[in-house]
Image: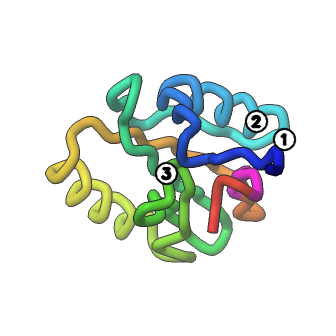
């Protein structure tokens, strides 16, 4: 018997706490980050919009991966991200959207938070 941790059995961090920590992480690294849309505090779906010199990226939940994000749009004009988020909002009105402005396009997600 090992001491491995079953991540599926662990409770998921509340969305509001995760977003607050993420905003602090971005600010600590010198990037501007703001909450563009507040969702459900406990279980809202989180999206990250990263605006950079080449356009924008959108990070969205990876299917079946808990609170792991994947980049679904890369270096697109910001209006494409806005259109995608409008479609997402119609499907899920409790979603969160965090907007990060970073010239280099850094996403500030930890290794276990993205694929």
Q: Identify the magenta region.
A: 107-111
Residue at 41% in and 65% down: 63
State the mark number for residue 25.
Answer: 2
**Quarter of the rendering occupied by the C terminus:** bottom right
Q: What's the CA distance linking mark 2 and mark 1?
A: 6 Å
The x, y position of residue 81, in whole percent, is: 39, 63
Q: Which mark is residue 29?
A: 1
Q: Quadrant of residue 21?
A: top right
Is the stretch drawn in magenta largely helix, strand or loop? loop
Q: Is residue 16 above or below residue 50?
A: above
Q: Is residue 57 above or below residue 102?
A: below
Q: Is residue 65 left or right of residue 25?
A: left
Q: What residue sits 72% from the left and 29% below the top?
A: 24
**In the shown orientation, is residue 66 left or right of residue 32?**
left
The reply to whether dot 2 and dot 1 touch (C-beta < 8 Å) is: yes
Q: Hey, which residue is sitting farthest left in the picture?
A: 90
- Determine crowd level at label 1: few under 14, some 14-19, many 20+ residues with C-alpha closer than 10 A: few
* Of the image marks 1 and 3, the number of the one nearer the N terminus: 1
Report, in whole angstroms, how far the alpha carbon at label 3 lies from the one at label 2.
Answer: 20 Å
Residue placed under numbered mark 3 in the picture? 66
């Amino acid at each position: 018997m090992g001491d491995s941790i079953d991540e599926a059995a662990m409770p998921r961090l509340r969305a509001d706490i995760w977003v607050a920590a993420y905003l602090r992480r971005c600010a600590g690294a010198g990037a501007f980050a703001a909450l563009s849309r507040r969702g459900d505090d406990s279980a809202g779906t989180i999206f990250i919009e990263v605006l950079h010199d080449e356009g924008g990226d959108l990070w969205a939940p990876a299917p079946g991966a808990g609170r792991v994000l994947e980049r679904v749009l890369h270096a697109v004009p910001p209006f494409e991200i806005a259109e995608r988020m409008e479609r997402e909002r119609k499907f899920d009105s409790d979603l969160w959207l965090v907007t990060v402005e970073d010239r280099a396009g850094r996403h500030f997600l930890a290794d276990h938070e993205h694929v």
